Image: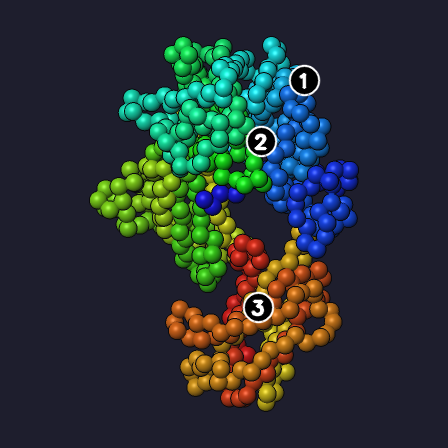
Amino acid sequence: MDWVLVNPHPPVFDKSEFRDVMHLNSAEIPGSDNESFTAFSNHFNDLRSVAKAQTDLEADITHTGVVGYTENIDKSKFFKYWEVSIDNPSLAPEQIAKDYDILFQTSHGEISYSEDVQDKVKAFLNSGGQLWWENCNGLVIEPGDGFTKEVKFESIRPGGNIKFPQIPVLDEDKNMHPLFDNIFRIDPDKSTRVMAPGIFTETNEISLLGDGEEWLNDDNRYLDNLLPTDEVILNVKDTTTGEMLPNLAIRNIVNKDEPAGRIVITTSDIACGITKHVHRGGGKAVEDYKFCYNLFGWMSKVGVSFDETRANTWDGSNEFSIEVTFTNHGARAQTYDVEKIIDTDIWEVTSTTALRDYKVYYPWIKELDDKGYPKKIELEPNQSEVVEYSFKIKTLDIQYYNFTLKASESGVENPRDTVETTFRLNNTRIEGPVFTGFRPNGFDITINAPEVITPDLRPETYELYLKFERGGRFIDPHEVFTHIQIEESNPTPELEGLNHNYMMDDKGNLYIRVTIDNVLFERTNERIRLNVFLEDKDYQVTGKIEVFDPISRQRNSFSDEVKGK
């Protein structure tokens, strides 16, 4: 999977918090003792890298029900990146619901929230937020302290390490819920992993969800006090009585004017099933990992993405095209309405006939708009499709053009599954390369700073393209070029050296690409001066400059071609 889990609003990284808990740090710090606070402070610059580097993932932060809980609370500091501060006044519930695919809550004991936090969690759910609510052995929500109707978590302990079977609830087509079968199938019949000694009843993946087998206990848990509208998707069977008891349920928070919120309620401590024994051999929680992947897949939204690199080839003319990818990251087939948002005063989408036979060749398209592009699409789980959009630019003298595509769950007034993605075509022009100092063995090039230095100073990658002509045709640069260097002169901006390689354009002409990394112009009088060395003086040179974001490789600005000697 190519997913990356992130916390959009992590806590502040305060290194001093770790000074007294370094004996619990399991991250390996190259060339140093991992208990050294000095080495820790020098090596880590953010909470995410701290959490990612830990090899001991077990960090229970509850105050009751755990032997040695004080140590685990201290250990949890190394995983602080994943904390979401609901009581943060700068995070509105609507913002949390928009920025987070899911929040996770668990405890070994009672949960008690102040009234303002309760109200904020309620508002989060009422804004379409999604919560995974897990009982980690003894979760109690006292009356009046919750943000939804209370649920009771109960246990049956028959003794003798007996694990009761967990049985999925099937739909009318005899299929398990997508939480058990979308990205991965959690097998209800068997398990491929080696069982721990002493557990001698259930050996299928569904029944082994949670940490019961990991700890060799017989804690068979179930839910009580569910609402009539709660959807039970997994039962646990008490083999001593034959009774089927709810083990896993989904609660929808239906709202009039917003997408429905959703709570996934689990009782078997699936998260602990993942973190137990990770550094002690691993491989004991296959089904729990599967469940987590399925959970994120089931809750993920439709994706709309643009091929940002396509803009790098635009030559400044009045025509442009870009590829758009539509992806269903969810666990079931979904129909989406597609809407274009564009300022038609400066550019417009041009009509196409490429998709007119969509019923034959593109059955995932269900309807076209007036320009011939998809208006309604239907995608299977994990299905991706690419559409090329073409444009005519009406006004060529502005800095950028925005084009937004919105895909939303079809037929729903307030859809949960919706996304808007904006593509920006940069049209920022800069001065071209200045050719001077022509001599028998070469010439000089000056790259000047932009006329306006933006306050958001970030390093950029500058690329200079050089083509050589002789007798009206382009020649192989190897025939004349020997090397290039940066002239040590003032005022030169901050940069990280220079390299060059040979490239070929779409017409088969070879040229030299000179790359200057991490250039940071801070003053308008700064310049980069280059000395070019040649073996032949019979040539004409043409040059062009392009400036890129070093991370995304999106082109930020470019110059026109300039001819030298």
Vertical placement of residue 113 versus 405, above or below: above
What secondary structure is marked by label 3?
Answer: strand
Task: State how far apart marks 2 and 1 are (Cα).
Answer: 20 Å
Q: For the residue carrying disc 2, how many other residues have a C-alpha within 10 Å: few (<14), some (14-19), or many (20+)?
A: few
Give me the residue at 49% from left, 43% from top: 3
Residue mark closest to the camera, 2 vs 1:
1
**x, y percentage for residue 108?**
61, 21
Depth check: 33 or 373 in front?
33
Question: What residue sits right under mark 3 in the picture?
Answer: 515
Residue 181 seen in the figure: no
**x, y percentage for residue 256?**
47, 18
What secondary structure is marked by label 1?
Answer: loop
Q: Is residue 332 left or right of residue 398?
A: left
Depth check: 253 or 68 in front?
68
Quarter containing the C terminus: bottom right
Q: How many marks?
A: 3
Quarter containing the N terminus: top left
Q: Residue furthest left?
A: 360
Question: What residue sits right under mark 1 in the picture?
Answer: 114
Q: Earlier in the sequence, mark 3 or mark 2?
A: 2
Vertical placement of residue 296 versus 548, above or below: above
- Tell me, yes or no, whether the two marked residues, 2 and 1, touch with CB atoms within 8 Å: no
Depth check: 94 or 453 in front?
94
Residue mark closest to the camera, 3 vs 1:
1
Question: What residue sits right under mark 2 in the picture?
Answer: 95
Vertical placement of residue 7 versus 119, above or below: below
